[in-house]
Image: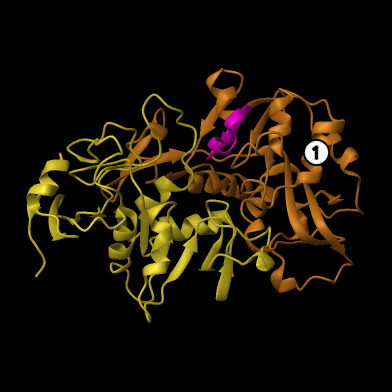
Chain colours: A orange, B yellow
Amino acid sequence: MSVQGTIDAEEAVTHIRSGDTIMVGGFGLVGAPLTLIDALAEYSDATDLTVVSNNIGEPGRGLGKLLRQGRIRRGISSFFTSNPEAVAAANAGEIEATLLPQGTFAEAIRAGGAGIGGFFTPVGAGTLLAEGKEEREINGVPHVLESPIRADVSLVYAARADELGNLWYRHTARNFNPMMATAATITIAEAGEIVPVGGLDPESIATPHLYVDHLVARA
Amino acid sequence: MSGADPKTLIAARTAQELRPGEVVNLGIGIPNLIPGHLGAGTEIFLHTENGLLGVGPRPSEGELDPDLVDAAKQPITALPGASYFDSAASFAMIRGGHVDVAVLGALQVSERGDIANWAMPGKDVLGVGGAMDLVVGAGRVIVTMTATTPSGGRKLIRECTFPLTAREAVDVVVTEQAVFRLRDGSFFLTELLDGATVEDVREVTEAQFDVQLDV
């Protein structure tokens, strides 16, 4: 796909329905699509969400808003601990928490977007996080089978986009955004700046527009 | 014992473990003190798993950039020659053995080199971050830790009792008393620090180890 003009954040979040799995980019709040998350908190009543994101925001900020609204049923993350309210919600049984090593989390999303049915990694073998997973010795080293992760909708942030939806990331705000853009049925990109087609150096585009369905300007 | 700050002592000694040109990932806490102890000419390349090779010093107020943080989400700078990459690529570097050294703290290390550094038993086990990837993937794993907990609990022990980060992953342990190296699956005390004696070390170490002091 390519995008056709920009849409409002309010309209963008109508693509998210109750029971959906959503991916949300960002390492903490760095590189998180905060305009889209705020719109989801404010304009949408989609609930019972499974959220795939490295963290569940911070208390009352980013995904922490949705958590306070009780709209997250399950989180898949590498580090819930950065939001103590997410930890409390998991301990109280209010959300289901699935913890993955950060590299496994990233690779599972990459695999989800790349049509890979799973992968064996040595990371986590012999630990709590391998429980219930198939283990196999490869070249004498224990490995764990990990499944790909996909979502109904991905929300990503890029510092710059062109009007086709090509994305250019800045510094460490890139993080999980490029793989999340590939791994959902619908990808919505929030851009800090939107330039005309041809305004991005083709060599520096990290996410080609075929991954992006809708484009929203950061508020 | 000189009474030097144990964390400073550990960081200063660990800095000597790093060789010029190496790619190094530094964990939170004592490892973060290491750059201040690198000798002139010991240029290393710092990798942060959230997507940067070529981490520079902390920024001044005027240099703060909200898009530029380390794995602890603290502000950093990027040096000339730095590169940015996404998280999947960053962890491919780590698992693929392209990061030469990971230096990190630990709650417990077993005498076989098992490491527990992400969760306390009975507490929340909801934040692992990149700890497992780093200890499995990095070329050398150096653990920096004080010899005991503040209440005197042993950390270098026979078997880890806390949730494991990885099995048989540690290569070197540096405490304020000693340097231990794993050789053929067991630990050797290779250096005494700051006036400590072998007896001092044995007193606070539950793990079995042999003494093979470097000359």
Which kind of residue does numbered mark 1 sit on?
A: Asp
Give the quarter of the image for residue B150: top left
B145 w.r.t. B52: above or below: above
Q: Is residue B102 above or below residue B109?
A: below
Residue at horizontal 28%, vertical 58%? B4
The segment highlighted magenta reads A74-85
Q: Position of residue B48 (x, y in %)?
A: 50, 59
Which residue in the protein does label 1 denote? A38
Q: Nearer the viewer, residue A106 or B51?
A: B51
Residue A94 counted in the magenta span: no
Q: Residue furthest top?
A: A93
On the picture, is B164 further left or further right than A166?
left
B33, above or below B115, in the image: below
Q: In which chain is the residue bearing label 1?
A: A
Q: Say whether residue A184 is left or right of residue B180.
A: right
Residue at 57%, 39% in the rendered image:
A82
Could you tell me which secondary element the residue under label 1 belongs to? helix
Q: Is residue A177 visible?
A: yes
Note whether B56 is above or below A74 in the view shown: below
* Horizontal and vertical percent position of residue B101: 35, 62
* The stretch drawn in magenta includes residue A80: yes
Q: Is residue A216 left or right of residue A207?
A: right
In percent of width and height, residue B168 lies at 25, 46
* Residue positioned 36% across, 27% down in the render: B121
Measuring from the top left, give residue A150's x and y in whole percent: 64, 39
Identify the residue at the far front of this view. B3
Could you tell me which residue is drawn at 73 percent across and 30 percent down? A66
